[in-house]
Image (cartoon, rainbow, N blue to C red):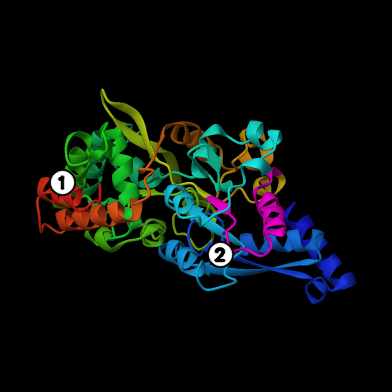
């Protein structure tokens, strides 16, 4: 289908000069990392333009860290964007500050029944929808099958304690110096890894309107992270890694385990650039015995229309196209579809059965980061606290206590 869509574009452009006669231009803001590649997004957009020759879409790609501020700052600049990619953690802030249009009345019955229920948490806030879910994602545990086999490990870890045991065994066998790679740079990436562990240990971010991550499962999560570093099981550079750094280390054969998003599976397991091609296994992130069977963070993202858009109708048509089941099924190698029936479609499942199986377990238990209008403030405090604990500048308890005080709650 990918080839067919591109062929349609080439034919339409040759016959009509699509770009030259476009009457409406849309400006769309996307992320330049993880999930769909820039090439995928350009191809999806090209097929929309081929079917809608009166519309041209100007694409802008920025690192994840720039998405939020770019969107917010554009509101006062005039013009700005017509379509923006937004994280599951932002609808509360965006809704309360009038940044995105409420599109509840545009949601069809087919969308409501066909899209996975968990995906709607990406765009919904206080009973309204502020876009359509586009990226349905969580972090999985990836492992190098050859390294586990060499260490005599028959099955991937089912608990975080088992991961520690397996990593210790691999390290002591001299197979790799640092068996585990994580995204622990002082950024949202670290909060996502921390959330995965917090969920596994049965923790909570907020209880009765007050911070709760500084005790119970939240504290156990950071204790686990710090202990893994101290034991030499986690690559110490993880404290500076974002997701692409983790992918590079893992696919270069320098890690036995890695926590990362969906997109890494096919890039590491099928790309000719990967030294571990054909050796990559993936499972849902582990749980904690007696507490949880699996763990997962809700890392989903949606497409919305800024309130300042001058072309909201065309912007909605573009979003509907980008989130449609045929388009999502065509590009399901780096990001899995939001549509329930896609998971039994051979076009989606063939060649990535392990990933689909892991998704069936992980997506079902995605744990949310707090849905609060001051999430950015809370996240910054947590990022700093996590970093201080991992650098040994403070104990996990002291670091989280300080984060709670500075969380804005």
Q: In what element is the residue under mark 2?
A: strand
**Residue 196, image x, y percentages:** 33, 41
Residue at position x 62%, y 38% in the image = 339
The one nearer the camera, 213 or 387, is 213
Q: In what element is the residue under mark 1?
A: helix
**Residue 262, image x, y percentages:** 48, 48
Q: State the extent of the magenta-drawn residues as a range.
A: 302-325
Q: Tell me: residue 61, above or below residue 233.
A: below
On residue 29, the disc is 2
Q: Tell me: residue 225, above or below residue 312.
A: above
Q: Within 10 angstroms of label 2, few (less than 14), some, or many (20 or more) residues?
A: many
Q: How many marks?
A: 2
88 horizontally vs 168: left or right: right
Q: Where is residue 39, by image quadrant?
A: bottom right
Residue at position x 78%, y 73% in the image = 19
Asked if the residue under mark 2 is in contact with the one under mark 1, i.e. CB atoms within 8 Å, the reply is no
Residue 409 magenta: no
């Amino acid at each position: 289908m990918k080839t067919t869509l591109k062929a349609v574009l080439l034919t339409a452009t040759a016959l009509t000069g699509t770009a030259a006669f476009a009457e409406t231009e849309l400006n769309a803001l996307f992320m330049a990392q993880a999930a769909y590649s820039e090439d995928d997004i350009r191809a999806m957009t090209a097929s929309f333009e081929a079917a809608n020759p009166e519309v041209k879409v100007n694409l802008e790609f920025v690192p994840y860290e720039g998405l939020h501020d770019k969107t917010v700052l554009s509101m006062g600049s005039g013009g700005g964007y017509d379509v923006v990619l937004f994280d599951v953690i932002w609808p509360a802030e965006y809704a309360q500050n009038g940044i995105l249009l409420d599109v509840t009345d545009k949601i069809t019955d087919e969308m409501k029944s066909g899209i996975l229920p968990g995906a709607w948490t990406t765009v919904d806030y206080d009973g309204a929808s502020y876009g359509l879910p586009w990226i349905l994602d969580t972090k999985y545990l990836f492992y190098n099958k050859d390294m586990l086999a060499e260490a005599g490990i028959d099955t991937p870890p089912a608990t975080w304690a088992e991961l520690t045991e397996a990593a210790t065994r691999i390290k002591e066998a001299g197979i790799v110096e640092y068996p585990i790679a994580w995204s622990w740079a002082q950024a949202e990436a670290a909060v996502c890894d921390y959330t995965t562990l917090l969920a596994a240990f049965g923790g909570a971010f907020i209880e009765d309107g007050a911070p709760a991550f500084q005790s119970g499962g939240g504290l156990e999560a950071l204790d686990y992270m710090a202990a893994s570093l101290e034991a030499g099981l986690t690559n110490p550079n993880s404290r500076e890694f974002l997701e692409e750094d983790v992918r590079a280390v893992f696919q270069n054969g320098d890690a036995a385990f890695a926590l990362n998003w969906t997109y890494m599976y096919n890039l590491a397991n099928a790309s000719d650039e990967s030294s571990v091609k054909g050796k990559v296994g993936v499972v849902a992130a582990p749980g904690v015995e007696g507490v949880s069977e699996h763990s997962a963070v809700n890392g989903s993202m949606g497409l919305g229309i800024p309130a300042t858009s001058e072309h909201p109708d065309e912007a909605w048509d573009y979003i509907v196209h980008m989130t449609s089941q045929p388009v999502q099924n065509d590009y399901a190698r780096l990001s899995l579809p939001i549509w329930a029936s896609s998971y039994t479609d051979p076009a989606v499942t063939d060649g990535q059965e392990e990933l689909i199986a892991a998704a069936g377990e992980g997506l079902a238990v995605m744990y949310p980061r707090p849905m609060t209008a001051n999430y950015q403030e809370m996240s910054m405090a947590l990022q700093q606290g996590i970093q201080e604990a991992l650098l040994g500048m403070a104990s996990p308890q002291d670091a989280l206590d300080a984060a709670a005080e500075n969380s804005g709650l």
